[in-house]
Amino acid sequence: MTPAELAALHAAAFTTPRPWSEAEFASLLSDPHCFLVTQAGAFALGRVIADEAELLTIATPPSLRRRGLGRACLTGFDTAARARNARQAFLEVAANNAAAIALYLGNGWTISGKRPGYYRAPDGSRVDAQILGKPLA
């Protein structure tokens, strides 16, 4: 997927946190620590530094949800992170994103903390982030 395709898909999938731009995706993809996992119409973007992987974002547009694409992207993320010698992974997710949290918990992630007011919603209000982690070793 190109940075433009990633940005368009991200915009279809998110309002909180705000969708990322084509330039932001291009910058991340040029980073040698970052990697992209794709499925037809979905993706996960991760980064590995030392032995820790971060799931930067994962996106499936509403029209393609509940078809296993997110789960497949998470499995691909785990595989790619392990191939880069990551032993553990973490992510941040909007606390009000129940569907995503359920997906993560169902795939072996556990809640490890919270970042109060981490995200800004389109109306200007603040939304907490849940921090989740998962061992990969």
Image: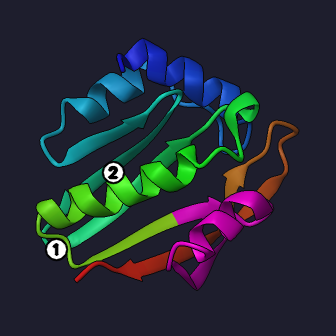
As for residue 107 lying within the magenta part, the answer is yes
Horizontal side of 55 relative to 112 (left or right) equals: left
Residue at the image point whose x is 65% and y is 36% from the top: 18
Residue at the image point whose x is 75% and y is 59% from the top: 99
Residue 48 falls in image quadrant: bottom left
Residue where numbered disc 2 is placed: 46
Quadrant containing the N terminus in the rendered view: top left
Query: Mark 2 belongs to which amino acid?
Result: Gly
- Which circle marks residue 72 in the picture? none
- The foreground one among 135 and 92 is 135
Residue where numbered disc 1 is placed: 51
Quadrant containing the C terminus in the rendered view: bottom left
Q: Which element is circle 1 on?
A: loop
Horizontal side of 94 relative to 35 (left or right) equals: right
Residue 130 falls in image quadrant: bottom right
Q: Which residues are magenta?
A: 92-116
Q: Mark 1 to mark 2: distance in Å? A: 13 Å
Query: Mark 1 belongs to which amino acid?
Result: Asp
Horizontal side of 102 relative to 110 (left or right) equals: right
Question: Residue extending furthest front?
Answer: 67
Rendered location of residue 98, percent (x, y): 78, 64
Rendered location of residue 56, percent (x, y): 42, 51
- The foreground one among 17 and 35 is 35
Rendered location of residue 65, percent (x, y): 70, 41
* Above/below status of 76 relative to 124: below
Residue at the image point whose x is 67% and y is 59% from the top: 100
